[in-house]
Image (spheres, rainbow, N blue to C red):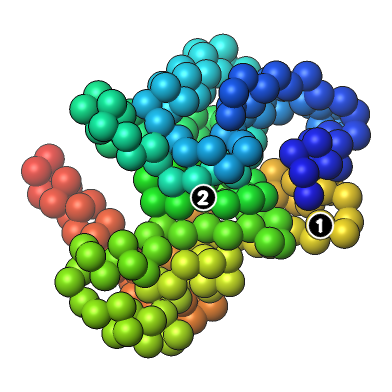
Amino acid sequence: MTLDDVLASLFPNGYSIETTGAMIAGRATLPDDKPIHVLGITKGRPLGVDEAIVLARRVIEIVNSGDRAPILVLVDSASQRMSKRDELLGLSEYLSHLAKALLLAEAEGHRTIGLLYGGSAAGAFIATALSTGTLVALPGAHPAVMDLPSMARVTKLPIDVLKAKAETTPVFAPGLDNMVMSGGVHVVWDDAAPLAPQLAAVLRRPHRQDDRGHLGAERGGRQKAAKLAERVTRAAASHQGARHG
């Protein structure tokens, strides 16, 4: 689906969304006549410092508005822009700032939903799609936290070893199916049906219910993440209680 197709199917009641370069931002009306904020990066472009700071500023403006309307983040990007300029300006800090802005919005009462309808990879994927409270995708989306050649360079493991692991362990492998199995993607929508009711179903989920670890365990993609997270949470709570006891 093209961006125009996605927007028309999501918001039959209308929308006012502007495109600036590879970025979009604006508002739309849900079927129940309630507002929703829309922003994102599109056209398969990389996410650099310029885009990250503009998107983060927009999220913070939404939080400061106090309306607590949901935020939909549309994602169709390359990876982060790995130019010398972006790296010298501190690209990782800009991406982190964007991710923290989305986490802040979720904490302040805005439902944050990521919709991956194209590609995304590496830091750009983490700072946008994976930083939303709930990530959904359309068929044909192709995410990758890290492709296998890059993973081979970082881990120093032979590419053949990583390819073998990717066949049995979803966390090693790029692609939508593996992201679903690991729990990163909550659900893949049906692009042959209207998207508005599918968005409404996601918005009805309890707010701040991060069940990615449990989904990964249920789907066989991440067996240990949820249990380890629970152990860390209990340990932190115990430590906090001992400090104030």
Query: What residue is shown at x 17% (from left), y 71% (from top)?
Result: 156
What residue does disc 2 label?
120
Q: Is residue 18 left or right of residue 62?
A: right
Q: Secondary structure at mark 2?
A: strand
> Between 79 and 168, which is closer to the camera in this rendering?
79
Label 1 is placed on what type of residue? Asp
> Between 230 and 103, which is closer to the camera in this rendering?
103
Query: What residue is shown at x 69% (from left), y 44% (from top)?
Result: 203
Of marks 2 and 1, the one in the foreground: 2
Q: Residues within 10 Å of mark 1 (few under 14, many from 20)?
A: some
**In the rendered image of this protein, does residue 171 appear above or below residue 103?**
below
Q: Is residue 99 left or right of residue 11?
A: left
Query: Looking at the image, do the residues carrying marks 2 and 1 touch, with CB atoms under 8 Å apart?
Result: no
Q: Examine the rendering and report whether any part of residue 72 can be seen.
A: yes
> Between 162 and 12, which is closer to the camera in this rendering?
162
Where does the image place residue 22, in percent across and percent down from the top left? 58, 29
**Mark with earlier residue (2, 1):** 2
Q: Secondary structure at mark 1?
A: loop
Q: Is residue 131 left or right of residue 200?
A: left
**In the rendered image of this protein, does residue 59 appear above or below residue 12?**
above
Query: What residue is shown at x 44% (from left), y 46% (from top)?
Result: 79
Where does the image place residue 124, in percent across and percent down from the top left? 43, 43
Label 2 is placed on what type of residue? Ser
Q: Examine the rendering and report whether any part of residue 60 can be seen.
A: no
Q: Quadrant of the C terminus?
A: top left
What residue does disc 1 label?
191
Query: What residue is shown at x 43% (from left), y 27% (from top)?
Result: 52
> Between 91 and 153, which is closer to the camera in this rendering?
153
Where does the image place residue 24, in percent across and percent down from the top left? 63, 26
